[in-house]
Image: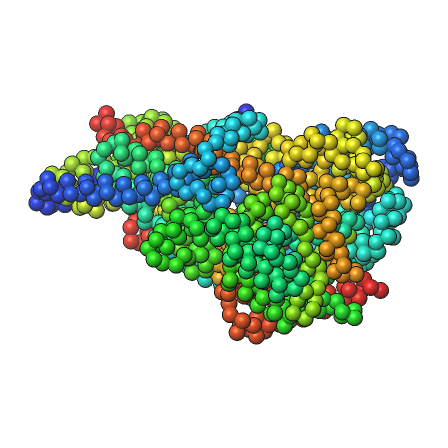
């Protein structure tokens, strides 16, 4: 076997030498979608099956560590029967997915479509402009009634996925369910009760509550082992608190929009105020000292331990056994009376979840295939599987059967687990992630949500590169310095220097680019 | 053998030897303790309740002893398949590595080989320049090796570092006079390599087998890039899949993530022990070849 | 015990007349050696020199759709971007200091360990020492960093000890000042046993008669180490040193990345992690390639210098 392989290698030496000299041009460039292939197959504009003659498609996808293989999932088995479209998934695990995805494009080894692909806006624009991804706006109009309806209902979807030239290269995962777009502010009400404290309404009250959590031994074990407040690694705490200081998170960045003016607020006085507040929490050990170094696993363990006063997460799934100790809290009002839930994902939450490539012979079929998952019916099939077998309807809403509510079984029947699947997440399919407790917590946030949540804008190819280069330096600097300000490793005397450096890194230029993109979007 | 460096000094008293031994054993004991402590931690952690480990309560002895981690591993088919794959890749890969390295290192160690320096330069340069991921991937793809074990073996058939180490050993530890003598006896270079050089090179061959085998055993990046079918995954890739927990897993509050975190935490340490066993067992076999006096026998004989 | 470089030169230069044809004769006489080299050399050409055309993307704006050769040339744009980066000097400083300290501390320790092992007379104890020190090599970095975090956390054993001795707990993992010590220290802990193997193997190749002779001459144990053991492994030491210096700009990024946080970034930000986070993760192949090329050129220059120096002083060299 070994020898044979070697012989083969040696023989192909000449061939490779030629390859090297010839430069081995890998990308054959922009092949337009070949509609000829689909001429033979009649695509039905509505109803199922989508095609009379079975059609086969290859899709590249990511499987999360929790998932099993896609072909065993009821959704894909049933949908194949229903649509007459046979999908062969090329599955790449989350670990190494980004590398494999890049290599597919770099070596022009394209599948017919990318499913759950989390393409970045930059990637979508780059591969789209290069002709490896095809523009979808026409196909959506013709063959995607569900998606079209959603885009009419929520205009921000179109704005978020259309390039300045008017093309759409990737379809996002769409979340109309408000509570799947926010991290709730969970507070330990058992502790509040025990210490006879009221729900904090301002940042000052929050401070007092945290001090009480720290000093008055709310868990009653005689030890000071309570963590008054914690958050995900890094600046998660900033995104969770910024709304109380009048700092919004528009356009997917640290941006306030007032009277159509875009302001990147990283160097602003308001931000300084917030950082000083967080610095106070950190130095007095009210904020978890490990917040800048713990891992995701440790953070989740802290959620589940019941030894934490305040933390932030979308659902209560990660601390279910002790969930009755916690309740959602409204954003506290800041020193200037600001009270806003700044952290919130836009309706098109998971950008780049699905895309069609130039080698696809049946783009119309593919578009109709994916569109189904943007209906409540399709989304239910995707998330819950078969009625009776995997779920039951109560008041018209699907609930998992007992056997499919565990971490072992549920992710094996649905690709939603692990995130990023292209489908619609609405009230209808949210029984599991949106139980009453989470709904309550969301209600606490609703009055404080900004009217419109602008998603990160699409730039044209060149601007996208420019933004990328600017943000590489600026983001890194901002994150590092903010952390140091909060942790007290950098004194606020250096604030002027911080502002100066941001200027030097051309933050004004970046602001202008976002302003231009915003103006185009609003037109 | 040049012995001019041998030193003339008055006889040393026995007590000095003893004193020296005490120091040697003392230092060795200290090193053992420093190295052993964290290892003990790993062993203890593997038998402990994962929540206690994560909470920082375990620091020497196991807390709330449990065998869950090991039973979990024992019942995981993926791990066993990964195990089998890794053993196959390591064995085949190491055999090819040793053959290739030997065939390159020996001729290049010969002082009488014309163009030797040029070839060494060509080889050494490859340690510094590489075409990068994409062209290498294209090459492997064009050779039809993607998604097969050959993609994990052939592109790494020789490690330049190991080649240089082996060559250095040939140059410094096998007397050139011996080889010249063999030549005069009319021995061909192949014969010379097989019947004289190899028997004299047991220590370095043992080290090379160890280096290459451990390299194969621990590697995952090539598999990450080239292997698609899950049934071909080597052990390390299977383990990464189980152990890595990222924020994206928590999107939409993925079901029972907490359980998974604890599972990953619990088997993390047990997995180290189970997955290092084969390579740990190798060492004593390698060690056997570090016996002094290989040379003497040969010179005398 | 020197590497026989000199005789080789002598061997060839004795043939002064018609150097060319003499060379051919020399080569033809040793045709079988070239035969041995054939497969490995062909392999080197295919797998190392074949993909080299990929280097050009450092001077291009790599666009996957256009392929490597089809992408447009941009000259030294990516290089200037790197040199002008706000972080360039910090990256360079950290990369250099971490490597320098590693070379000064982590390089000699395995040698000393090997010498120590060689001096232990009890076979069982020596085997134990080798086995134990070699185990940590197999613990994956994820776990190593996990262990470090537990050991060095605010309520971990080390801080307990510090507090018991009346000191204040130190936040080791979140301190820029401690980063390099922890990084290099744990590297030594993990790899000294593994790296000593090669020296132990070399030591076992030393002719025992040399020790006997030295003993006869009345040399003390320390002197025997100095005059027999060390010279016996000098060629190996020199070669490994040259190779290490030749990798001066490269540090594995995985462990640093896992230990990195915004509070220690001041001393933990190195070129390899920068390449990973701003290049590979964001698919900026060209920028990454440019930085890689910059690294390679420096490494190669260092290697050539050290190699020349080594050849002059110890008669051992890579070629």
Q: Residue at x 54, y 29 (%)?
A: B72
The C terminus of chain A: image quadrant: bottom right
- Is residue B243 among what the camera can see? yes
Residue B289 vertical placement versus B124 (above, below)? above
Picture quadrant of residue A100: top right
Coloring applied to the structure: rainbow
The N terminus of chain A: image quadrant: top right
Residue A523 vertical placement versus A319 (above, below)? below
Residue C191 vertical placement versus C175 (above, below)? above
- Is residue B181 among what the camera can see? no
**How many marks can you see?**
0
- B230 vs C120, left or right, is right
- A115 vs C62, left or right, is right
Closest to the observer: C53 or A393? A393
Q: Residue at x 87, y 29 (%)?
A: A53
Closest to the observer: C60 or B276? B276
Residue A412 position in % (x across, y down): 68, 33
Q: Residue at x 48, y 53 (%)?
A: A224
Q: Residue at x 8, y 45 (%)?
A: B10
Closest to the observer: C210 or A219? A219
Residue B65 position in % (x across, y down): 45, 33
- C205 vs A294, left or right, is left
Closest to the observer: A425 or A394? A394
- B34 vs C223, left or right, is right
Residue B15 position in % (x across, y down): 11, 41
Residue C51 position in % (x across, y down): 58, 45
């Amino acid at each position: 076997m070994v020898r044979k392989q070697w012989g083969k290698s040696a023989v192909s030496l000449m061939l490779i030498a030629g390859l090297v000299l010839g430069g081995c041009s890998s990308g054959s460039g922009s092949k337009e979608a070949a509609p000829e292939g689909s001429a033979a197959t009649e695509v039905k504009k509505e109803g199922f099956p989508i095609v009379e003659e079975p059609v086969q498609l290859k899709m590249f996808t990511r499987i999360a560590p929790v998932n099993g293989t896609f072909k065993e999932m009821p959704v894909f088995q049933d949908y194949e029967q229903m649509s007459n479209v046979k999908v062969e998934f090329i599955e790449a695990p989350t670990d190494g997915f980004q590398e494999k995805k890049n290599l597919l494009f770099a070596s022009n080894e394209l599948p017919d479509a990318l499913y759950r692909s989390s393409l970045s806006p930059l990637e979508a624009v780059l591969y789209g402009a290069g002709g490896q991804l095809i523009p979808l706006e026409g196909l959506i109009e013709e063959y995607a009634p569900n998606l079209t309806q959603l885009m009419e209902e929520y205009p921000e979807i179109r704005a978020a996925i259309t390039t300045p030239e008017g093309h759409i290269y990737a379809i996002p995962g769409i979340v109309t369910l408000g509570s799947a777009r926010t991290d709730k502010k969970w507070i330990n009400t058992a502790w509040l009760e025990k210490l006879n404290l009221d729900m904090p309404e301002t940042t000052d009250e929050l401070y007092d509550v945290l001090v009480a959590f720290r000093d008055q031994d709310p868990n009653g074990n005689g030890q000071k082992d309570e963590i008054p407040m914690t958050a995900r690694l890094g600046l998660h705490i900033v995104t969770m608190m910024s709304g109380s200081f009048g700092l919004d998170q528009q356009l997917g960045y640290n941006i306030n929009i007032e009277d159509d003016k875009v302001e990147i607020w990283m160097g602003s006085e308001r931000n300084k105020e917030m950082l000083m507040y967080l610095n106070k929490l950190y130095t007095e050990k009210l904020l978890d000292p490990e917040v800048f170094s713990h891992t995701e696993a440790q953070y989740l363990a802290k959620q589940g331990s019941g030894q934490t006063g305040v933390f932030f997460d979308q659902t209560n799934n990660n601390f279910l056994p002790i969930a009755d100790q916690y309740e959602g809290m409204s954003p506290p009002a800041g020193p200037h009376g600001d009270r806003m839930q700044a952290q919130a994902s836009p309706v098109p939450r998971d950008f780049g979840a699905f895309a069609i490539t130039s080698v696809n012979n049946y783009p119309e079929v593919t578009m109709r295939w994916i569109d189904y998952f943007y209906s409540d019916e399709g989304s239910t099939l995707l998330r819950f599987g078969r009625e009776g077998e995997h779920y039951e309807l109560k008041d018209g809403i699907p609930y998992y059967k007992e056997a499919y509510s565990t971490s072992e079984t549920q992710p094996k029947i649905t690709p939603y687990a692990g995130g990023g699947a292209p489908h619609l997440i609405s009230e209808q399919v949210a029984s599991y992630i949106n139980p009453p407790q989470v709904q309550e917590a969301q209600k606490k946030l609703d009055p404080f949500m900004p009217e419109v949540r602008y998603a990160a804008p699409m730039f044209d190819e060149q601007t996208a590169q420019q933004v990328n280069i600017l943000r590489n330096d600026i983001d890194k600097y901002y994150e590092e310095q903010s952390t140091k300000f909060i942790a007290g490793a950098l004194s606020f005397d250096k604030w002027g220097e911080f502002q100066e450096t941001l200027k030097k890194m051309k933050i004004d230029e970046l602001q202008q680019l976002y302003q231009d993109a915003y103006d185009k979007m609003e037109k | 053998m040049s012995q001019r460096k041998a030193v003339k000094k008055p006889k040393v008293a026995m007590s000095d030897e003893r004193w020296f031994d005490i120091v040697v054993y003392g230092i060795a004991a200290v090193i053992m303790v420093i190295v052993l402590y964290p290892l003990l931690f790993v062993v203890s952690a593997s038998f402990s309740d994962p929540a206690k480990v994560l909470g920082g309560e375990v620091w020497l002895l196991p807390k709330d002893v449990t065998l869950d981690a090991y039973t979990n591993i024992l019942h995981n088919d993926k791990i066993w398949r990964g195990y089998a794959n890794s053993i196959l890749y390591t064995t085949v890969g190491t055999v090819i590595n040793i053959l290739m390295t030997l065939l390159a290192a020996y001729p290049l160690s010969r002082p009488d080989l014309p163009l030797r320096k040029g070839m060494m330069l060509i080889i050494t340069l490859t340690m510094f320049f590489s075409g990068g991921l994409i062209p290498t991937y294209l090459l492997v793809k064009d050779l039809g090796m993607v998604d097969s074990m050959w993609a994990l073996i052939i592109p790494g058939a020789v490690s330049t570092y190991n080649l240089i180490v082996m060559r250095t050993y040939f140059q410094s530890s096998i007397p050139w006079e011996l080889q010249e003598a063999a030549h005069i006896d009319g021995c061909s270079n192949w014969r010379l390599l097989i019947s004289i050089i190899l028997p004299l090179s047991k220590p370095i061959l043992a080290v090379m087998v160890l280096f290459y085998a451990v390299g194969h055993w621990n590697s995952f990046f090539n598999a990450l890039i080239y292997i698609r079918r899950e049934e071909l995954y080597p052990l390390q890739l299977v383990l990464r899949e189980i152990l890595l927990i990222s924020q994206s897993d928590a999107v939409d509050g993925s079901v029972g993530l907490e359980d998974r975190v604890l599972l990953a935490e619990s088997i993390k340490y047990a997995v180290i022990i189970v997955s290092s066993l084969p390579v740990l067992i190798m060492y004593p076999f390698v060690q056997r070849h570090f016996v002094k006096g290989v040379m003497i026998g040969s010179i005398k004989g | 015990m020197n590497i026989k470089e000199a005789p080789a030169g002598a061997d060839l230069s004795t043939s002064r007349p018609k150097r060319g044809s003499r060379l051919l004769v020399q080569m033809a006489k040793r045709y079988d050696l070239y035969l041995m080299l054939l497969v490995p050399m062909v392999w080197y050409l295919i797998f190392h020199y074949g993909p080299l055309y990929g280097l050009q993307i450092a001077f291009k704006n790599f666009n996957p759709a256009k392929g490597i050769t089809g992408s447009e040339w941009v000259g030294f744009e990516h290089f200037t971007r790197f040199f002008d980066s706000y972080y360039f000097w910090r990256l360079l400083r950290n990369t250099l200091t971490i490597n320098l300290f590693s070379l000064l501390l982590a390089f000699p320790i395995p040698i000393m360990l090997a010498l120590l092992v060689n001096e232990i007379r009890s076979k069982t104890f020596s085997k134990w020492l080798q086995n134990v020190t070699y185990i940590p090599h197999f613990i994956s970095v994820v776990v190593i960093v996990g262990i470090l975090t537990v050991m060095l956390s605010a309520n971990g054993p080390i801080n307990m000890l510090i507090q018991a001795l009346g000191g204040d707990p130190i936040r080791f993992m979140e301190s820029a000042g401690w980063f390099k010590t922890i990084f290099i220290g744990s590297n030594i802990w993990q790899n000294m046993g593994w790296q000593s193997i090669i020296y132990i193997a070399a030591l076992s190749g030393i002719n025992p008669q040399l020790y006997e002779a030295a003993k006869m001459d009345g040399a003390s144990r320390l002197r025997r180490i100095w005059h027999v053991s060390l010279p016996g492994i000098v060629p190996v030491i020199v070669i490994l040193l040259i190779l290490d210096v030749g990798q001066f700009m490269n540090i594995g990024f995985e462990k640093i990345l896992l230990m990195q946080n915004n509070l220690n970034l001041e001393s933990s930000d190195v070129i390899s992690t920068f390449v990973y986070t701003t290049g590979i993760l964001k698919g900026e192949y060209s920028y990454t390639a440019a930085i890689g090329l910059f690294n390679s050129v420096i490494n190669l220059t260092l290697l050539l210098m050290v190699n020349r120096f080594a050849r002059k002083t110890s008669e051992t060299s890579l070629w």
